[in-house]
Image (cartoon, grey):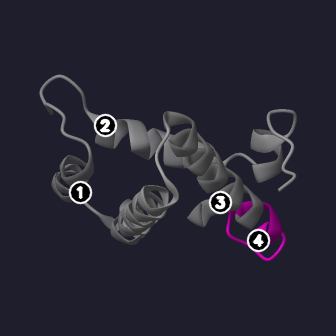
Amino acid sequence: MKVFKTNDNNKELQEIYDYVFKQIELSIREIGYGDVTINKKMKEYINLFHSILSKIDNWSDLNDTNKSKILTNFIPFDTSRLDLTKYFDKYEILLSKTTLNSLIKGVIKLKI
């Protein structure tokens, strides 16, 4: 997200954010939870999302050990089988070389 955060993309990023959390809410409703539970779960998901963002804000400045520690807080994985830090490093490079429009064009029409 940080890669695309410019004044030109702010509206699109907000629409993506709103769309993603609206879809999560709809999925929770389909499961059959009541309004109180939905509100509670949405608060948990939004707080988790923002917690992840705050911890990975300086991702490119962190060493591999610190990156692994951050990831294991959110995703339990065996580092000997799968190196997610390298995956996310490569993904960050891809995002830095790609425009936001090329990633969302034709995939999703944001109308909230």
Query: Residue at 25% of width from left, 33% of height from top?
Result: 83
Direction front: furthest residue: 34
Q: CA distance from mark 4 to mark 2?
A: 28 Å
Residues rendered magenta in the picture: 4-13
Q: CA distance from mark 3 to mark 4?
A: 10 Å
Task: Identify which residue, 36 or 84, lies in the foreground.
Answer: 36
Residue where numbered disc 2 is placed:
84
Q: Earlier in the sequence, mark 2 or mark 3?
A: 3
- Mark 1–mark 4 Cα distance, whole angstroms, equals 27 Å
Q: Report, in whole angstroms, how far the alpha carbon at label 2 lies from the one at label 3.
A: 24 Å
Residue corresponding to mark 1:
70
Is 53 left or right of 79, judged from the image as shown?
right
Residue 103: image location, x then y, percent: 75, 41
As drawn, 100 above or below 103: below
Depth-wise, is mark 4 or mark 2 nearer the camera? 4
Indicate yes or no whether the magenta region holds residue 7.
Answer: yes
Q: Which element carries disc 1, helix, strand or loop?
A: helix
Residue annotated with mark 3 = 17
Q: Which residue is mark 4?
A: 10
Q: CA distance from mark 1 to mark 3?
A: 22 Å
Q: Secondary structure at mark 3?
A: helix
Q: CA distance from mark 2 to mark 1?
A: 11 Å
Amino acid type assigned to the residue bearing label 1 in the image: Ile
Query: Residue 36: x, y in percent?
Result: 45, 63
For residue 73, side relative to residue 101 (left or right): left
